[in-house]
Amino acid sequence: MEIRVLGCHGSQFPGYNTTSFLLNGKILVDAGTVTSVLTDEEQANIDHILVTHAHLDHVRDIMFLADNICYFEKDRPLVVISTANIIDALKTCLFNDVIWPDFGSIPHPDRPILKFQVIEPGRKIKIEDLHVSVVRVHHIVETMAFIIESAKGSVIFLGDTGPTDEIWKVANDLGNLKAIFIETSLPNIMKDVADRTGHLTPSSLEEELKKLEAHKTDIYIYHMKRHHQKSIQEEIALIRNRSIRILEDGQVIRL
């Protein structure tokens, strides 16, 4: 599995892109940053978008990608996959012919640019040679972690989350868990704010990782707020007995 980090930050500034991961050149996990970093050909190659939640920094570029695809003459729709509530939020708040055109019916309802597919917790779907499932995590809005399994191993992408439990039970039952991508948005001094808004600090990340039995699984950190990045990195460095790596925009990870 090849994972290209299109964006991994919790705030946007020049050189700091919001969350989006490209898997095997064809599947996005979230779409905060897509069209500003991918070529026309790379955008046209995307077939599926897995959406953890409907916050704008995770979904914004679905709008621009859909608009671009109109001119690529693809012979199949771009499939947006999430839970029913998250998809409803996208349709109601973004693709509503007010904020942005309804690409679920353009250019024709029978041949739309976008197709929305519901995934339910507890059930797996197959995307090419991958099996995908979701588990709810604890954010301020409905948010899902995606579990992606291949013949060679498994990967978990947690959407924005505060302390949570079920995903760690699932992680402990997975065979050959290669990596976990997890947010750490704020420094320890802002733990009260993090708790209220459904985010992690290094100290709460450390507590979460105690729930994970596999100590050799690589942990990739994203969604740091730029103004607190140095403090967060220093505090994460104090966590022992874990393979923790800080993600950077443009990084490519092969598992």
Image (cartoon, rainbow, N blue to C red):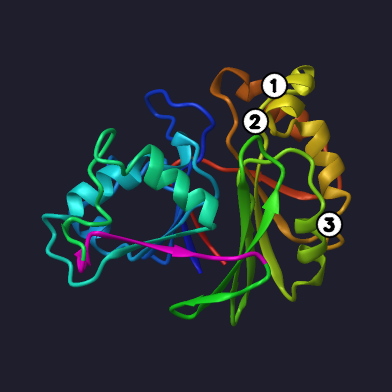
The label number, if any, that marks residue 198 in the structure image:
none
Whichever of callouts 3 and 1 sits on the residue coming sooner in the sequence is 3
Residue tagged 2: 185
Whichever of callouts 3 and 2 sits on the residue coming sooner in the sequence is 2
Residue tagged 3: 212
SS for tag 2? loop
Q: Which of 119 and 108 is in front in this view?
A: 108
Q: Distance between the residues labelled 3 and 2?
A: 20 Å
Residue tagged 1: 231
Q: Which of marks 3 and 1 is in front?
A: 3
Question: Does residue 13 appear to the left or right of 232 in the view shown?
Answer: left
Q: Looking at the picture, how far across and down is residue 162, in whole percent?
A: 74, 38
Q: What residue type is labelled 2?
A: Ser
Q: Which residue is rendered at x = 82% and y = 48% of the image?
A: 209
Q: Which of 131 and 7 is in front in this view?
A: 131
Q: Magenta span covers which residues?
A: 110-121
